[in-house]
Each structure stands twice: as C-alpha cells, then as structure tokens.
C-alpha cells in the first residue's frame, strides 16, 4: 500500500529536516516512478505526490501519454543519463532535466527549448565518487561549466544533482554528500537561480537531508 509508505517517508523527511534545522516543506520529494505502471503512479499522485522522476525518455513518454489528465499539476523530472539524440523529446515532456553533464548536451537542450519557446529547468549532475559507472562532472570543473552553460538563454540552471555510491550502511555516504553540498554552496553564492540540491535515494536520503539536500529521489522505498 503505497499511501502508507509515502506517509512514512514524509515523516522521515521531516525528522531529518528538523535535524538540519529546516522545515519539512523545504524538502521536495521526487517519487521515482521508473518501472512503475501508470495505475500505480496515479495512486501515488492521489496520495499527494507532486513530483515524479523517470530515467528513460521513451518509456516516460508512453506513460505520460497514457496518464493524460491524471498528471495535471505533477512536475516531471528526468533523472537518467540523457543522450543528445533524446534531448528533443526530453525537452518536450519534462519540467526538469536533472542530468545535465556536458556542453554538447546543453547545446542540444538549448536548441530544442528555443524551438518551442521554453525555458528548460536543468540541474547539473556532479560526480562526487570515483566509480567508473557514474555520470556527472567533477566538482573541480563545475564553476567553469556553470559559467559556460549560463550563456544558454533557454536553459535555467536550477541546482545540482548527485548520487552517492551504494553502501549497506548509509552513514558511509555522508562524505560524498558533504562534497556535493560544498560545491552547491560555492555556485549558489554567485548564481541566484541555483536552488535545488538533489541528492538522496531510498537507502540514504536521511543522511543526504542532514547534509543539506532539499530534493530527494525515492523509488523502491515507495513502490518496491
Ligand atoms: C532509480 C533512481 C533513484 C531512486 O532509487 P531508489 O533506490 O529506488 O530510491 C534515484 N535517482 C536516480 C538517478 C535513479 O536512477
């Protein structure tokens, strides 16, 4: 029953927010609906979910089409790695692209957003671990990247997204989240539009919030 699970998650979000001296309303819950069928997404929305995250453009498109009006007012986040050849579709169907990680991708997003007269919200993906398999920019390169990407008139840089490596013990993710927070604060100081620090998943979101996340992306703890 995901209504109960969502309640519980919101409670844990509140507690972690309190630990870091913030109200629960400061934290946005993105329910990650990848692999979740439309009927179940609709139930989550009925239970108060206002943001959803998908990681495949094609699959998301089918689901959004199928769901039509039942997604009214729901913010759609793209959280997967985005290939430049999928940027057009992504710009058409997502409110936020959380995985901006290269200038060629920014150029594609710019082109297609301009084509439909949209300002596309994007988060810059930063890679705080040295795992081979993860995408994102190194924290050291962020300043320069943001400076370049800020020149694209149809892209609004709205914050940072990151992932910590998986650990059984979520405490071990803390240093990675700290690193992302530091990078976030640095850029935020010179960029008023920088608002979201998207980090924390089912296993580690409480630690991420304690370390400053104001957006968490949670899948299995809600739908699993
Ligand atoms: C799948 C996914 C999540 C959610 O992970 P869970 O462990 O199921 O909560 C969050 N962020 C990204 C980028 C993902 O791909």
Image (cartoon, rainbow, N blue to C red):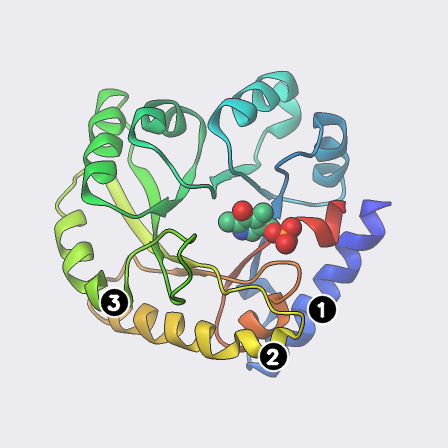
Q: Is mark 1 on a helix, strand or loop?
A: helix
Alpha carbon distance from label 1 to label 3: 28 Å
Element class at badge 3: helix
Q: Residue 166 appears at what percent x and percent y?
A: 58, 64
Residue depicted at x 38% and y 67%: 128
Q: How crowded is mark 1: few (under 14 residues within 10 Å), some or many (20 or more)?
A: some
57 displayed left or right of 103: right
Does the closest atom of ligand 1 sit within 8 Å of the Cβ of label 3?
A: no
> Which quadrant, please, contains the N terminus?
top right
* Mark seen at residue 187: 3
Residue 84's x, y, as percent? 29, 30
Secondary structure of the residue carrying numbered label 2? helix
The answer to whether the residue labelled 1 contacts the one labelled 2, judged by CB atoms less than 8 Å apart, is no
Q: Name the residue under label 1.
A: 12
Residue 171: which numbered mark, if any?
Answer: 2
Spot occupied by residue 52 in the image (x, y as percentages of width and height)? 58, 41
- Picture disc at residue 104: none
Sequence order check: which comes first, mark 2 or mark 3?
2
User: Is residue 30 visible in this depiction of the protein?
Assistant: no
Q: Which of 135 and 88 is in front in this view?
A: 135
x and y, in percent, of residue 126 in the image: 34, 59
**Circle 3: is it few (<14), some (14-19), or many (20+) Cα within 10 Å?**
some
> Which circle's residue, 1 or 2, is located before the other in the chain?
1
Task: Between residue 48 and residue 103, name the one nearer to us.
Answer: 103
Q: Is residue 182 above or below residue 132?
A: below
Ligand 1 near label 1 (Cβ, under 8 Å)? Answer: no
Q: Quadrant of residue 182?
A: bottom left
Q: Report the Cα–Cα distance between label 1 and label 2.
A: 16 Å
Q: Distance of mark 2 from mark 3, alpha carbons?
A: 26 Å
Mark nearer the viewer, 2 or 3: 2
The residue lying furthest to the front in this view is 132
């Amino acid at each position: 029953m995901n209504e109960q699970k969502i309640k519980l998650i919101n409670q844990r979000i509140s507690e972690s927010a309190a630990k870091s001296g913030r109200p629960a309303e400061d934290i946005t819950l993105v329910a990650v609906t990848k692999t979740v069928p439309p009927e179940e997404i609709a139930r989550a929305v009925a239970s108060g979910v206002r943001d959803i995250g998908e990681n495949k453009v094609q699959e998301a498109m089918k689901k959004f089409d199928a769901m039509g009006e039942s997604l009214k007012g729901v913010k759609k986040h793209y959280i997967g790695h985005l290939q430049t050849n999928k940027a057009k579709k992504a710009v058409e169907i997502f409110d936020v692209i959380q995985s901006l990680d290269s200038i060629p991708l920014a150029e594609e997003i710019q082109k297609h957003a301009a084509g439909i007269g949209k300002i596309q919200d994007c988060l810059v993906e930063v890679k705080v671990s040295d795992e081979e398999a993860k995408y994102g920019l190194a924290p050291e390169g962020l300043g320069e990247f943001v400076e370049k990407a800020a020149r694209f008139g149809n892209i609004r840089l709205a914050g940072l997204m990151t992932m910590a490596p998986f650990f059984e013990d979520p405490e071990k993710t803390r240093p990675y989240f700290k690193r992302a927070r530091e990078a976030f604060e640095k850029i935020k100081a010179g960029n008023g539009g920088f608002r979201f620090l998207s980090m924390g998943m089912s296993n580690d979101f409480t630690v991420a919030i304690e370390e400053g996340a104001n957006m968490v992306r949670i899948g299995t703890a809600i739908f699993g």
